[in-house]
Structure formats: structure tokens, C-alpha cells
Amino acid sequence: MENGVNGFHQEKHEISAATQKENFVKLLAKFLSHRDAEQKNTEDVLFDMFRNEDTGMVPIGKFLAALRTFGIRMNDPRISEMMENLRKVHRLANFEGGSPETQNLNRETFKAVVAENIVLIARAFRHQFVIPDFQGFCKDIEEIYWRCKTNMDGKVASYIPQLARVNPDYWGVSICTIDGQRFGIGDVSIPFSLQSVSKPLTYAIALEKLGQETVHEYVGQEPSGRNFNELVLDYNKKPHNPMINAGAILVCSLLKTLVKPEMTLAEKFDYTMQWFKRMSGGENLGFNNAVFLSEREAADRNYALGFYMREHKCYPDKTNLRECMDFYFQCCSMEATCESMSVVGATLANGGICPVTEEKVLRPEVVRDVLSLMHSCGMYDYSGQYAFNVGLPAKSGVSGGILVVIPNVMGIYCWSPPLDPLGNSCRGLQFSQEIVSSFNFHRYDNLKHATNKKDPRRHRYETKGLSIVNLLFSAASGDVTALRRHKLSGMDVTLSDYDGRTALHLAAAEGHKDCVLFLLEQCGVPYDPRDRWGNMPIDEAETFGHHTIVDYLKAWAEKKERQNHVDEHHKNGVADEDIVRTGKKDVPLGEYDKSAHSSPLPQDDSDSRGSML
């Protein structure tokens, strides 16, 4: 009897487990189906948004240009699959001349091309990046850049000839957000040596490999209150922090002696270079041997610091001081550009995850410690003033660079060789101060209550939900980008206000032809809605003297009437061979239907198109 009861319970348990598994599979299938349907819908909306009304195809150049306005570059690794698909489509189509960006794609080909990167693309067009209005933000940055360019203060560093020969007119600013939005202006592609900007990076590697406890057994965390290269240690007979010369030399000794101690000096240099490249998303990094040799020749003070610390037994056991000093000079002599260093800043702003490769390079707690010391000790003897006035983690170098990190927002790199008496770039300091005067980026700016500063993290017309007010305001102000966002979010763009006035009414009344074209051609809104006074959009355009819009709306109305006439004949059983009068030429209906849907791709016997996508 007992065995029978146990068997019954066991059978009941097995049935219950099987039912749970079946329910889970159904739920998962439903979720995946919903996700695929949503993705499919997004691809269709994107296609309709950029589709040419006459050809029924998407001009890829127009689509990519719109993507660039959000800060996404065509060499971004996150859209590499889409760009490779475009190149393959271009090859298969046997186009002579032109480029992949000059193609026109039909619906199916377009969807196949963008499918692998649709998540990032959809986020861009839905304005879900950290800086939604990136174009407006870049315009403000440009204005600050040109104001700073007129600053002629400062002198170029002259303690080694390679720095003394640099053109003092160089001035570049690069920005990379935590979503990989990129912008650069000025001399952003000219390489320069990192100098002291390498210090937070070597400190980050040491923390990542050895841990906070081990690293700070040898080096402190306090601002020294003294000159950055002074012969002084803290009360524990340790360097004050890793951002001054003594602390950076000691961090290099930890990397050389405790991290993979079996490596030679050359191997350790390559190892460190690979870490730097991972932080920069694989962008341009190099090494200037002339700077390295000059640094080593002019290093009396640094050697004095090194031997002074050896006297006080600051180094780990088995440290080779000469090799450590060479390693320190090598790190300072690494070359980068504003573009690559802005990605490093964005990696630090993003909690250690590189925004362009999406690789987790550093642990969040490592980034926290690095930014804390950059905030308190990163600007030589100006660190306290910088923390007070700018309120952001930053690190400067005598080559003229300043790495600025806005946590959870972006990394900025400014480069201009002329320095102030404390060794910081004059233009870089002015840029830092102006950017926190214009935007609420200071760490202690109030984000909740209104100030006279802009917050680029907020949507231009931010509300709790999309509303008719936003839609009509976008149309009235001529903001096609906002109209695209409303369309992509699934909003009904035919909605009207209490007077029956639609977005098309307002766009026509204000003379915004690009908005009128977008609403009619891409959104398919009716061309003849009437408001409470019986006025149509064409009446509004006529009233306010926008004659080009009047002509366009008249032509559109005639075109729609012809299409309706064709559709009626088609419903009544008119054969495909009947002639459709398009207004330009007579086209057989069968060809007319195919013109909007046929693929531009040639048939490939090897079925390479299938393997491509």
C-alpha cells in the first residue's frame, strides 16, 4: 500500500514537472515570437521612414546620413555587420563605380542588411542614447571650441626638444559618450605622447591585476599639497598618490615586479600597450622612441625620486630600479590621438566597459578608485582649484592633453600644447570651465531643479509620455528628427488637437516643406483633413503665402486621385496589361507593381546572397 502511495506521488510529481516544463517552453516561445515581431516591425518602420515615394526603395546614403546625426560613425564595430552586408550587396549587384552608400535597397534586402544590428539602430532612431539631441549638443561644443581657440596664453613644454618643437596652434577636442556617440573637432587625428595622462591608466591596470589592498600597501591616496615631482613621501613613507611622479614610478614597479614577473621588459611593454588598446577600443595607439630617449636623458629628478624611494624601502622585493624607470618612461612616451583617448575616457565613464567594443575591460570598483584620485589629484598643483571650479575627474599631461571623465555620460579629451605655469593646457582648462558653465556636468550641480544650465541628457521635449502637444510642436517648429522619433515609437501622427488641426496643418502653415514631405511620403497621412473651420493644409499654406507647399500639395492630391482611379479599375478586374497613367509615362500595371518591390540584386548561382545574410 505504501509503495502504491509513493508511486502515485512520484507520478504526480513527474506530471507536474512535465507541465511546468511545457508551460515554460510555451512562455519562452511566446516571448521570442513577440520579440521577433517587434524587431520585424522596427525594420519595416525604418524602411518606410526612408523609402523614396517614386522608387519604393531606400537610398542607403540618406539612411546612413541620418544614423551619423546620432553620433554613430560608419567604422563603429557595433555596426560592422551592417556595413559588411552593404559591401556584399554592392558586389553581388555588379555595380560599376559608385560605392555601397549609393545603393537603393528594396524592403527585403534592407531588412536583411540591418537585421544583425537592429537593436543599436533602433535605439539611435528612438533617441534612447545618453545624449538624445546629439546634433544640438555638438553645435554647443563647437561654439565653445572656437571661443577657446582664440586663447593664446601659455608656453609649450621645453624640457625635451620633441615637446618644444610642437606647433602651439594645435587644438583638438574629441568626445565619446557611454553609448559610443562620437564627435571631434580640430586637430583630433595628430598623435602626441601621453606623458602624465598615462598615470591613471597604469594605476587602473595595477588595481585590476593586484587589487586595491596590495596596490595601496605601497602607495597612498592623499593629495600631496606639494609639487608633483618633489622629493617627499607621506607619513607612512609612501608616495602620496599614483598621480604624482613618485607614485606613478612605484605603480610601474608593481606592474613590472608583481604582475607576470616572468616577462621581460619588452614583453611587459607589449602587455601594457594591449591594455591601453583595449581601453581605447582598438583605436590609434603608438610609441615615440625619440620622446622615450629624451625623457630618459632629462630624468635627473625622476631618478632622484626613484633612489629616494629605494632608500626608504618603498619598492616590492626583487625590484630592478633601472628597468622600472625605463618602463615608466615608456608608458609616458606612448602616443595617442584625441579620438582614441576620448574612447579611453568613455570606458572610464562607462564603469570599465568600452562603449565601442562593448568589452568589459575594468571592474567597476577599479574605475571608482581611479576616478576618485583623478578628481582629487589629477591636475598637478591645480587639482584643488579644478575640483572646485569644474568638479569632474581629470588628468593632464605636459604634452598639452587633458582627459576629462563625466561619469555615466562621456569621456572628453582636449589637446593644446601651450601650458600654464602649473603644467596644464591653457585652452583645455578654459574648455573644461566653459563646458560646466554651459551644461550641468559639475558633480554637484542640481539635476532636479531648474537652472540656467542645459542638461543634454534630457530629451528636447521631455514628457512622461508622447502626446499630441509634442507632435504638433515638432511639426510647427520644423523638427523632422522629432517627427521621425514619434513615428518610430508607434505614435499615430494623424492625431489632431481640439480644433481638428493636425501636424500637416501646422507644418504647411509654418512653411516647413521637409516636414510636409515626411508626413505625406513617409507617414502616409491624409493630405486633405479639415479642421473645425473647414480648412485643409493647402488652405493654410495659401493663407500664409507658402506657394511651393501649395504647388506640392496640389501635385500630391492629383497623384493620389490617379492612384485611387487605378485601384478602382484593379478591383473591377482590369487585366495587368491595362495601362496605368503615372503622370510621367505609360507603364504596364505588371511592371508598375514590380518597380517598387523587385530586388536590385542579380540572381547568384552560387547562392552567395543566402550565405551573406
Image (cartoon, grey):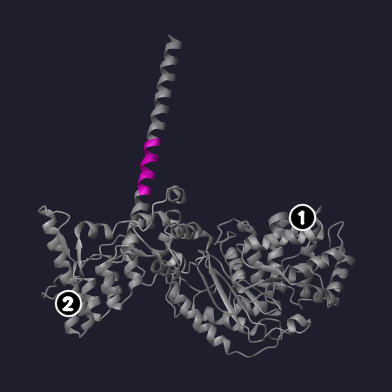
Residue sitting at x 77%, y 53%: 260
Give the quadrant of residue 66: bottom left
What kind of residue is marked 2?
Ile
Q: Nearer the viewer, mark 1 or mark 2?
A: 2
- Considering depth in this image, is 174 or 553 the residue closer to the camera? 553
Give the quadrant of residue 161: bottom right
Residue sitting at x 44%, y 74%: 135
Rendering coords of residue 267 (x, y %): 78, 58
Q: Start and end of the magenta stretch?
A: 24-36
Can residue 237 be seen from the camera position used here? no
What kind of residue is marked 1?
Val
Read off the residue under disc 2: 538
Q: Is residue 481 left or right of residue 388?
A: left
- Which class describes the residues within 10 Å of circle 2: few (<14), some (14-19), or many (20+)? many
Rendering coords of residue 166 (x, y %): 70, 83
Read off the residue under disc 1: 259
Image height of 535 relative to 493, above or below? below
- Which class describes the residues within 10 Å of circle 1: few (<14), some (14-19), or many (20+)? some
Q: How much space separates mark 1 and mark 2, taking CA atoms?
A: 74 Å
- Considering depth in this image, is 447 or 260 the residue closer to the camera? 260
Can residue 149 be seen from the camera position used here? yes
Image height of 525 relative to 110, above or below? below
377 falls in the magenta region? no
Please tell me which of labels 1 and 2 falls first in the chain: 1
Image height of 35 relative to 218, above or below? above
Give the quadrant of residue 352: bottom right
Residue sitting at x 35%, y 42%: 30
- For residue 203, the mark is none
- Considering depth in this image, is 67 or 235 the residue closer to the camera? 67
Rendering coords of residue 117 (x, y %): 45, 56
Magenta span: predominant SS is: helix
Rendering coords of residue 397 (x, y %): 69, 76
